[in-house]
Amino acid sequence: MFLRNDLRLLDFMNMKKELWVTALQNGTVIDHIPPEHLFEVVSILGLHKESVGITIGQNLASSKCGKKGIIKIADRFFEKDQINRIALIAPNVKLNVIRNYEVCEKIYIELPDELVDIARCPNPKCITNNEPMTTRFKVLSREESKFKCRYCRRVIEKDDLKLL
Amino acid sequence: MSTKHLVSIKDYTKEDILRVLQEAEEFEKNPNQRLLEGKVVATLFFEPSTRTRLSFETAVNRLGGRIIGFSDASTTSSSKGETLKDTIKMVSNYADLIIMRHHLEGAARYASEISDVPIVNAGDGANQHPSQTMLDLYSIYKTQGTLDNLTITMVGDLKFGRTVHSLLIALAHFKPTFHFVAPKLLAMPEEYINFCKKRNIPYYEHEDFTTEVINQTDILYMTRVQRERFTDIMEYEKVKNVYILNNAMLDKSKETLRVLHPLPRVNEISTDVDDNPKAYYFEQARNGVFARQAIICDVLGIV
């Protein structure tokens, strides 16, 4: 009796899980997004301007990191350099590329060699804060998250970079 | 061929530095050469700097070039809100070369990405001032006969002084030994200390400015400790007289030692040093014209 109830519960949980994870026929699932950065990811990828079906899950249980955000985007696939734009705020994010209900590719995000038009230089005297222009930061160290502004040449820690 | 610019001293390899210094030497022997005949050079000084502008304009005049430009951005359309991009785009239609100074850091790098004609950076805020570095190097080369294996002592504000940072980077090609003499608050930034470490360049940091250090030195590079750098005025009072060079301190120094200073000086070199043959800061400024003639011809691919 108890066993049957447990199984039913398990079925129910699986069904629920499926609702979140695999109901996409074709598209991209962005998983393991730190909840505090979920909406920044939406903004960086310009998803608020998309007309395709998008499901956003926030504060879902994650075995890896406690809570997570997840975004499912129907019929939309990303180029690697597009997706690397979010590496600065969400370095452990994983992308599942779904085709015909199957995960056909897993993409792990990596920080590009140069951050182009992703962040603002914290130096108020930097030309980039005074002209309408593209910002560029060279990634000096991935481990220590250190960056160098192409223009004012300041070395900047990750926490001092503000996203555009 | 892509357009050649001089934005940062890092744009120059060791060979570039040596080539430009040799050209400067030629210009010193024969300063009036009409190599810029028929050329128009723009000097865009978004931030006023009389000394640097006059030095560049003298260099252009001695080369027979014509000058357009401004010495103060308040009289130009940038004060009406024109972007730097638009100003540079416009001027690069008129001139064969743009020499620019700007109060914002990175302005010259950005201009070099937009301009169809060469850009020479005459200072961009606290960032780069490569022609100053080249005239410093030329002064060292001239007085020591070489750039190799010299002991260079830098004194004063080593934190904010862009001239010492660029000079350090340029000298790294030539096996130097450095002494950094500065109050803790104005010590050489970690970035440059790490730069020395990585290249195995010997360096010594001192808080006291002593004759012991001076007596080992070939080039004594003085800078100004500015009151406005200190948030705590007590701190300034404590150190303001520590980094002053007077004539007696040079008594036992090497015969070949020379004292350099990017100028303007306030009180960090006593006037009694001025008549000592080891004082070189006024000649140093004169060398600026030759170094700038060489830089201009180099970016334009003349000579």
Image (tube, coloured by chain):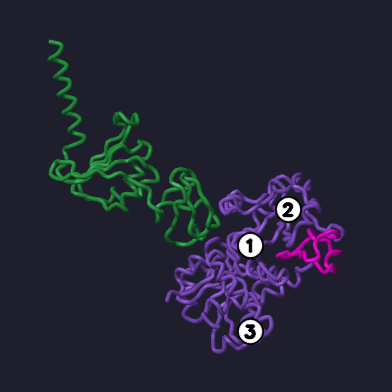
Chain colours: A green, B purple
- Kind of residue sitting beneath label 2: Arg
- Kind of residue sitting beneath label 1: Leu
Disc nearer the start of the sequence (3/1) = 3
Magenta region includes residue B254: yes
Q: Secondary structure at mark 2?
A: helix
Q: Nearer the viewer, residue B104 or A153?
A: A153
Residue depth check, mark 2 versus mark 1: number of the one nearer the observer: 1
Residues at discs 3 and 1 in contact (Cβ within 8 Å): no
Whether residue A59 is situated above or below residue B83 in the rendered picture: above
In the image: residue B271, left or right of residue B154: right
Residue identifier under label 3: B61
Point out residue B226 in the picture as x, y percentages from the top left corner: 72, 55
Disc nearer the start of the sequence (2/3) = 3
Q: Is residue B80 visible?
A: yes
Residue B167: mark: 1
Quarter occupied by the C terminus of chain B: bottom right
Tell me which corner region of the image, top left, top right, bottom left or bottom right, holds residue B153. bottom right
In the image: residue A142, left or right of residue B13: left
Residue A117: mark: none
CA separation, marks 3 and 1? 27 Å
Within 10 angstroms of label 2, few (less than 14), some, or many (20 or more) residues? few
Q: Which residues are magenta?
A: B250-278
